[in-house]
Image (cartoon, coloured by chain):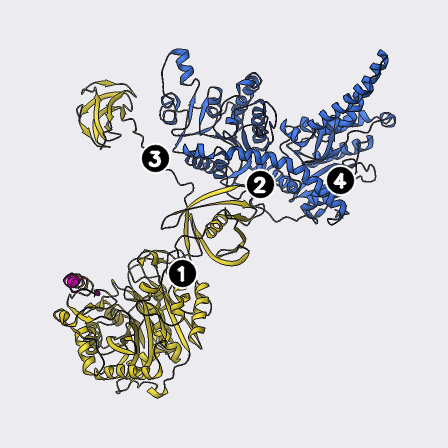
Chain colours: A blue, B yellow
């Protein structure tokens, strides 16, 4: 292959300015994360008095210490559904991929410490996404449950899609993907089915309760008076009803049992880390590569040189079209095809990418999309060249390629460019965004101008053009869109799996490519109906 | 010619080393279960005996293997006059003095009389009846004893009867003889002993003195030669006194005359008629092999050197590594040696191998570590360095205690007396350094590894609990790659590891630390840790509500209590028959039976409440 050189100089003034801009983009993301942690920390004493561990503490006990933890969808729900202070980021759960007893698992820990852990539509969407991650990557799903139930304000938005969560659970079981749930707190009504549909249920004595109707509703409905423990306590369910399988004495004991269940499964351990060739240029450079001014173009190869083994990249058809970059490389030893943008996608570029995607599909190589595009080239010339036809071809290739696809939004991801580069709608295996990412149907300024032009035309027909109103309309539209296209806003809507630090990009890609490569080793035994709780 | 070494451990190996140099074949005896011990493997032939104290078996072993000499080492049969005599009767050469000399010196009272008769200063003393005349402070000793057993210090005559009683019973238990002597006690003396050697040709020499003042419970821990408190003139006077005593009893072979020394005056304490544990320090400063001399004397040769040919040069210090917990009354410890590496530059006399079990059946001494130098300070520095590099993993030992002693200013200045450990020395805090616990977390978690500690979320905070053997310690840390950061900001980084060492940076300083991992147990530095973070929780009392439920449908066979009866937890209250099996119904808690509706023959349903017990306030 060909070793890339780097033209970016880490010591230059431009690099420093770029890095400062990237740090400024990282800061608000980190601030959100810290606010969520602080909110949980604030209730530590209250839960400690009850002998309960905070969600992060539960997570730390559950995972193999020191093993990598890929947190997913940490910003889901940020400033949505009544989240005024932004601590709703994470949408009621801490989730990701971590290692338990040497096996990578999808882990979902209810974050009852923040806003009571009630489930909003985003919270539900996040859980559905994690189920998808478990299914696609064939990973056991371990839940540490202590939910406040559905947020009744949004109950109507959660009710019907919530059914999909239970259907998914049944289907995961049938697929042979084990689900282990520790019930640390109350799991009422619909919430009771989440553990109920798990393959292995661990209940914590004196804390866990599972029932379809709690004592107050029961009294209202039938007049029966019952205590929490008699109605659905851990002891009752493990000794009498059989809803629970293992009785734990406290939070830590429940987590011990969850680890023991995973350890006992006939499930392969993650492979050992083979020696890999590092890129020639340091990951820290990734902070200073992207121009502070988003209008300034830069060569995507500069990023690739910091991501791939030995900075070794085989450019595909570089002479044919320069704006859409395709080529072969390896990340931590895993062969991949990379598609990047050095400008708008042209008819030629779309054709080149379409061909390259088919080649990777033929070779069974995962695809990595590095988004930085304003979209497809517009104008008379491109239209005459059949840009719609060629764009459609690329989109067909992306949608139908059978190999796993990974997307990282390293800059703009606008318009149909987002689709062609395997945006969320195309179900990439994982999609991450850099803090400077912008995802939108079009640029905010352009959107403002479009609104102005259309409205101005209408005003002219009406005979009176109010330029002050037009200014306000243009600016208002641009501002609204600008706010909604930031990485945080997109991530809040679950349009990605997380905002990542650019310096961690290679590690994250290496992790998920490792999971993809080891899929075949995780042989599952499918059944028709899953395992029913008898 | 073969030599049977009637001992085990380091001394057996030590004796065999010289025996081989002299061209002898070696025969070992070993207790049952010690057939794989180093000393048994080091010998050409090895014979199992029921006990190292079984003289008849040892002699039979010598016969069976054609051994012509028996070297007793120290301890066990080394000062047993009957055994020495039995060897002679069996035609075996006993490497040691005559049975008569052993018997004489083995009796403290007679030994003291002999010393006085030879003109050696003795402390006033006698039988227990002499106590009042001597006055306090007073030392009570077992007449036939040694090793500190049966010794009692009396500072008030009112305590004397009890001290006598207890010393007598201890002496009876340890030596089979409860007779006692009393002696004027010195409160702050040094223990200084003179190595003597005699041959069958009437020659007796001394090889200078050893200072063994640092003792715990009357057992030596640190020994050195020469004594910092003895100058040439005093050496000559003490040497002359020791030689006079040896000569007076026709002593043959290696012996040690022990003295108490205070303010330049010395008094006879006792004479040991064998090779001493601490003989290597004398070897270091004389350049001689004392075991070689023992063999030469035993086969009838004259001593190789005359007194004026014996020169002392330099200084040597020995420490005894014990499997004991100094923080816990020097309680002997047992365990398995996972890793053992004596520090470079030290003479290490030991019989340790990795994987070896150290049991409670024998003396807890594991090894002797000896350093020497031109000057005392040079020797002390070398010892300190050597101890810092000595690794013993798997069981608790006095290793760090020895390091502290060697570093102690009173010892450094050569001022330690027998009161050192009780008066001058304060052991360092025994709480483990959180930095080492953090390092243990990193080691157990498998650091360093690619992407160790990698997270895309907040830095993971770990809280782990360890059983240290003496308690439970908790450490909280934050991971930052292969580094752990303690709450106080200290950073611990694990740079690399192999099977026996980790290289760690603690507070910016890199060092190699020995470590071993056996299952859940991690030995690191001086710590032995078991991660109990996720140990199964104790089951909370299930019978909290005091109700006894029928485990399944059946009929009542027997009712064993009545309403109002007081019952204990676990007591059988009734018997149920179901599925052709009898099931006892037991009390889940202690208390009073407050509800009971059972009659024999009654049918019950599953989970029917049969009996209720109400707990009573005690």
Question: In 3D space, how far apart are the residues under numbered discs 4 and 3 (Cα atoms)?
Answer: 61 Å
Query: Which of label 4 and label 3 is nearer to you?
Result: 4
User: Who comes first in sequence, dot 2 or dot 1?
Assistant: 1
Residue A4 in the image, given as x and y percentages of width and height: 75, 47
In front of the other: B477 or A409: B477
Disc 1 from disc 3: Cα separation: 39 Å
Are the numbered discs 3 and 2 placed on the same chain, yes or no? Answer: yes
Mark on residue B455? 2
State whether discs 2 and 1 lie on one chain: yes
Q: Nearer the viewer, mark 1 or mark 3?
A: 1
Q: Is residue B155 in view? A: yes
Q: Which residues are magenta?
A: B152-166
Examine the structure image and report whether residue B214 is included in the region drawn in magenta: no
Reading the image, the residue beneath label 4 is A291
Q: Quickly name the residue at label 1.
A: B400
Magenta span: chief secondary structure: helix
**How much space separates mark 3 and mark 2, taking CA atoms?**
35 Å
Q: What whole-number distance in Å separates the C-alpha atoms at marks 4 and 1?
A: 59 Å
Q: Please state the horizontal and vertical placement of residue A321, each as a whole percent of the image.
A: 82, 36
In this rendering, the answer to whether A186 lies above or below B467 is: above
Residue labelled with disc 3: B539
């Amino acid at each position: 292959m060909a070793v890339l050189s780097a033209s970016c100089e880490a010591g230059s003034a431009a690099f420093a300015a770029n890095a400062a801009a990237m740090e400024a983009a990282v800061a608000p993301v980190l601030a959100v994360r810290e606010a969520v942690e602080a909110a949980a920390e604030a209730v530590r004493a209250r839960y400690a008095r009850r002998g309960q561990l905070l969600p992060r503490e539960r997570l730390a006990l559950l995972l193999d210490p020191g093993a990598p933890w890929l947190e997913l969808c940490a910003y889901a729900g940020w400033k949505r559904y009544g989240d005024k202070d932004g601590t709703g980021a994470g949408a009621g759960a801490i989730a990701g991929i971590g290692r338990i007893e040497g096996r990578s698992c999808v882990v979902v820990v209810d974050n009852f410490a923040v806003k009571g852990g009630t489930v909003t539509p985003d919270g539900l969407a996040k859980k559905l996404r994690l189920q998808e991650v478990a299914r696609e990557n064939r990973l056991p799903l371990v839940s540490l449950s202590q939910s406040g139930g559905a947020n009744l304000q949004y109950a109507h938005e959660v009710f019907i899609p919530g059914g999909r969560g239970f259907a998914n659970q049944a289907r995961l079981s049938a697929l042979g993907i084990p689900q282990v749930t520790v019930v640390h707190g109350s799991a009422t009504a619909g919430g009771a089915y989440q553990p109920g549909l798990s393959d292995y249920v661990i209940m914590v004595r004196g804390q866990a309760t599972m029932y379809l109707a709690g004592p107050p509703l029961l009294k209202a409905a039938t007049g029966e008076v019952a205590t929490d423990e008699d109605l659905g306590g851990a002891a009752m369910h493990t000794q009498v009803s059989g809803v629970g399988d293992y009785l734990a004495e406290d939070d830590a004991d429940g987590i011990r049992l969850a680890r023991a269940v995973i350890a006992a499964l006939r499930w392969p351990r993650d492979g050992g880390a083979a020696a890999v060739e590092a890129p020639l240029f340091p990951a820290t450079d990734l902070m200073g590569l992207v121009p502070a001014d988003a209008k300034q173009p830069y060569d995507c190869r500069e990023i690739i040189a910091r991501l791939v083994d030995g900075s070794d990249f085989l450019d595909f058809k570089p002479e044919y079209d320069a704006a859409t970059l395709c080529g072969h490389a390896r990340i931590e030893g895993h062969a991949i095809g990379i598609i990047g943008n050095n400008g708008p996608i042209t008819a030629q570029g779309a054709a080149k990418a379409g061909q390259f995607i088919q080649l990777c599909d033929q070779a069974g190589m995962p695809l990595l999309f590095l988004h930085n595009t304003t979209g497809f080239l517009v104008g008379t010339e491109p239209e005459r060249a059949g840009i719609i036809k060629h764009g459609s071809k690329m989109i067909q290739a992306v949608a139908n390629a059978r190999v796993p696809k990974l997307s990282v939004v390293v800059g703009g991801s606008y318009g149909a460019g987002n689709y062609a580069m395997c945006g969320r709608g195309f179900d990439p295996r994982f999609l991450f965004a850099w803090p400077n990412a912008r995802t939108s149907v079009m640029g905010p300024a352009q959107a403002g101008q479009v609104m102005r032009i259309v409205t101005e035309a209408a005003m002219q027909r009406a005979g009176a053009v109010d330029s002050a109103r037009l200014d306000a309309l243009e600016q208002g539209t641009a501002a609204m869109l600008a706010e909604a296209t930031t990485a945080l806003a997109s991530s809040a809507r679950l349009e990605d799996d997380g905002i990542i630090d650019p310096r961690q990009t290679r590690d994250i890609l290496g992790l998920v490519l490792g999971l993809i490569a080891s899929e075949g080793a995780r042989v599952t035994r499918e059944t028709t109906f899953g395992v029913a709780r008898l | 010619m073969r030599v049977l070494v009637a001992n085990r451990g380091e001394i057996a190996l030590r004796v065999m080393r010289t025996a081989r140099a002299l061209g002898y074949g070696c025969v070992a005896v070993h207790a049952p279960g010690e057939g794989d011990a180093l000393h048994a493997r080091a010998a050409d032939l090895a014979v199992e005996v029921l006990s190292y104290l079984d003289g008849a078996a040892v002699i039979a072993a010598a016969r069976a293997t054609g051994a012509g000499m028996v070297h007793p080492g120290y301890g066990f049969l080394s000062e047993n006059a009957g055994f020495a005599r039995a060897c002679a009767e069996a035609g075996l050469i006993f490497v040691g003095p005559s049975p008569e000399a052993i018997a004489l010196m083995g009796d403290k009272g007679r030994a003291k009389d002999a010393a006085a008769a030879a003109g050696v200063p003795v402390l006033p003393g006698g039988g227990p009846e002499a106590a009042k005349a001597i006055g306090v402070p007073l030392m009570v000793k077992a007449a036939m004893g040694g090793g500190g057993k049966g010794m009692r210090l009396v500072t008030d005559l009112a305590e004397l009867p009890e001290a006598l009683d207890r010393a007598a019973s201890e002496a009876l238990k340890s030596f089979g003889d409860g007779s006692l002597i009393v002696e004027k006690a010195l409160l702050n003396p040094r223990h200084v002993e003179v190595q003597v050697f005699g041959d069958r040709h009437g020659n007796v020499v001394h090889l200078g003195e050893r200072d063994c003042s640092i003792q715990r419970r009357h057992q030596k821990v640190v020994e050195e030669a020469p004594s910092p408190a003895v100058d040439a003139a005093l050496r000559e006077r003490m040497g002359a006194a020791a030689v006079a005593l040896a000569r007076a009893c026709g002593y043959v072979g290696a012996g040690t005359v022990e003295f108490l020394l205070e303010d330049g005056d010395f008094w006879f304490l006792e004479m040991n008629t064998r090779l001493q544990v601490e003989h290597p320090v004398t070897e270091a400063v004389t350049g001689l092999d004392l075991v070689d001399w023992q063999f030469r004397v035993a086969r009838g040769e004259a001593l190789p050197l005359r007194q004026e040919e014996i020169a002392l040069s330099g200084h040597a210090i020995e420490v005894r590594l014990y499997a004991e917990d100094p923080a816990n009354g020097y309680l002997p410890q047992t365990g398995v040696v996972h890793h053992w590496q004596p520090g470079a530059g030290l003479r290490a006399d030991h019989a340790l191998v990795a994987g070896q079990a150290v049991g409670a059946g024998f003396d807890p001494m594991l090894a002797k570590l000896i350093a020497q130098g031109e000057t005392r300070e040079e020797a002390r520095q070398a010892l300190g360095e050597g101890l810092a590099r000595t690794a013993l993993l798997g069981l608790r030992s006095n290793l760090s205690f020895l390091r502290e002693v060697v570093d102690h200013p009173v010892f450094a200045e050569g001022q330690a007396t027998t009161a050192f450990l009780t008066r001058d020395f304060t052991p360092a805090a025994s709480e483990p350094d959180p930095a080492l616990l953090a390092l243990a977390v990193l080691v157990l978690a498998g650091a360093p590894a690619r992407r160790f500690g990698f997270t895309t979320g907040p830095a993971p905070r770990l809280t782990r609990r360890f059983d240290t053997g003496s308690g439970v310690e908790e450490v909280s840390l934050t991971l930052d790659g292969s580094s752990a950061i303690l709450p106080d900001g200290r950073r611990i980084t694990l740079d690399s590891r192999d099977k026996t060492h980790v290289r760690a940076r603690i507070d910016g300083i890199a060092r190699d630390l020995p470590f071993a991992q056996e299952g859940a147990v991690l030995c690191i530095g001086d710590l032995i840790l078991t991660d109990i973070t996720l140990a199964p929780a104790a089951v909370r009392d299930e019978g909290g509500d005091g109700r006894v439920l029928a485990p399944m449908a059946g009929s009542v066979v027997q009712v064993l209590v009545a309403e109002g009866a007081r019952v204990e937890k676990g007591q059988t209250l009734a018997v149920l028959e179901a599925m052709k099996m009898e099931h006892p119904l037991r009390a889940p808690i202690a208390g009073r039976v407050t509800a009971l509706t059972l009659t024999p023959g009654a049918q019950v349903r599953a989970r029917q409440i049969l009996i209720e017990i109400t707990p009573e306030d005690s």
